[in-house]
Image (cartoon, grey):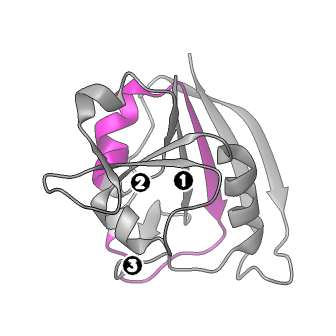
Amino acid sequence: MLKMIVACDRNGAIGKDGDLPWRQSTDLQYFKKLTIGSNLIMGRKTWDSLPGKLPGREHFVLSRNEHSDITIINFEDAIKMEGWIIGGGEIYELFLPHVSQIYRTIINTRVENADTFFPDITGEGFELTDEEFLEAGPKDDHDMTFQVWTRR
């Protein structure tokens, strides 16, 4: 079973200039808690944005090119796996019809000149099954809302 995890601003922005447009320690801790011990499936740009392999997780990258430092996987094999789709924008769009749940963090901001967006999930068969607002902690740029969307 595949799940998706994403942090986006109030307009669905997830990236700017190849990086996250905010610093949210609380959301990173949430990401780690949910994904530890799991497979992470991502596109090459997302892989390039990481500081390296995240401890306690297997990493799989969809790419047209070989990379010596990571396991390359194709879409057909990826949709048969269990794990988390972690981005980026094109990967989220590609896998959206194949995931059972979306764990979405809404970062309470609007990013100017964002260049990567999470797809609109309206009409995709998901319903909001959990939601929790958190005020920004000492290492967060903004307040946030954790949401869980489950496929009907």
The circle drawn on residue 6 is: 1
- Residue 37 locus on image (x, y percent): 66, 42
* Left or right of 85 in this view: 56: right
Residue type at mark 2: give it: Gly
Using a 10 Å C-alpha cutoff, classify the residue at mark 3 as few (fewer than 14 neighbours), some (14 to 19) or many (20 or more). Answer: some
Residue carrying label 3: 16
First of labels 3, 1 by sequence position: 1
Image quadrant holding the C terminus, namely top right
User: Observer-nearest residue: 80 or 14?
Assistant: 80
- Residue 87 locus on image (x, y percent): 41, 54
Total count of labels: 3
Which span of residues is magenta-colored?
90-115
- Disc 3 to disc 1: CB gap under 8 Å: no
Residue type at mark 1: give it: Val
- Disc 2 to disc 1: CB gap under 8 Å: yes
The circle drawn on residue 43 is: none
Using a 10 Å C-alpha cutoff, classify the residue at mark 1 as few (fewer than 14 neighbours), some (14 to 19) or many (20 or more). Answer: many
Q: Element type at marker 2?
A: loop
Residue carrying label 2: 87
